[in-house]
Image: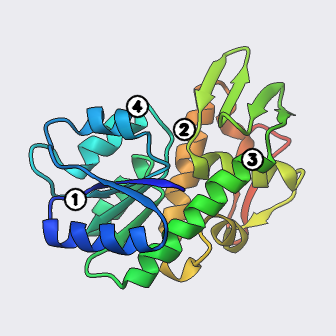
Amino acid sequence: MFRILLIEDDMTLCKEIHDRLTSWSYDVYRIKDFNHVMQEFTSVKPDLVIIDIQLPKFDGFHWCRMIRGHSSVPIIFLSSRDHPTDIVMSVQLGADDYIQKPFHFDILVAKIQAILRRVYNYNTENVELKTWRSATIDYQKNTVTNNQGTIELSKNEILILKLLIEHNNKIVSREELIRSLWDDSRFVSDNTLTVNVNRLRKRLKEIGLGGYIETKVGQGYIASEKVQL
């Protein structure tokens, strides 16, 4: 049974989400004391976190940062705010999806199922190590290590890297990447993929590998054999 931590201060909505997800056999925990969010996160050890943006004490972006400082657990934002900067900010902080309120509950369930299937099936099926550019990629730990250090990638970032490497210096279209990352691409902004790829490049740059992910305008991306300076 997957554990889901719900960080939402609207008690009516919180109860509805709790009851509905419980009926789908998820083990759902609700934050009741917003002074101790991280303590409850550590205690619950959730498989997925759902966060509202507007919260008491600190907003959802703050808690996303805090969680990302300790864990790569999948995160879904819920918000009544529809400004594009909120969506971009959530992706930049490492969230896996963003759902605008009001939403149809079937969409929330579909996104949860897709993320859990992608993240946890993916990890159990790919426990081997991969060598790329003299770096070791651990698909179970979501890490990339070379002589310049080790970085930990988010689920989306490691999956993008895996798809690009597997295509062996061939272009992977934006459409293929979106379909692989998000099962229901109807609800995904093209800009969301761009933000994820840019985050991946930034992380790889920390260990000298940022120049190997090349954009092919109008086509997609490639794990290039040639460093782009």
What percent of the width, then of the height, locates residue 168?
90, 51
Q: What element carries label 3?
A: helix
Looking at the image, is mark 4 or mark 2 earlier in the sequence?
Answer: 4
The three-letter code of the residue at mark 3 reads Thr
**Foreground mark, 4 or 2?**
4
Q: Where 27 sits versus 145, above or below?
A: below
- Residue that label 2 marks: 202
Q: Where 105 sits versus 97, above or below?
A: below
Instruction: Mark yes or no: residue 206 visible.
Output: yes
In this view of the protein, which residue sits in the foreground, 24 or 160? 24
**Quarter residue 17 falls in:** bottom left
What percent of the width, then of the height, locates residue 64?
33, 45
- Separation (CA) of disc 2 from disc 3: 27 Å
In this view of the protein, which residue sits in the foreground, 126 or 4? 4
Q: Are marks 4 and 3 in contact (CB under 8 Å)?
A: no
- Residue that label 4 marks: 69
Q: Which part of the image, by quadrant, shows the N terminus?
A: bottom right
Left or right: 36 as drawn, with respect to 159: left
- Residue that label 3 marks: 124
Residue count near mark 1 (Cα–Cα under 10 Å), binned few <14, some 14–19, many ≥20: many
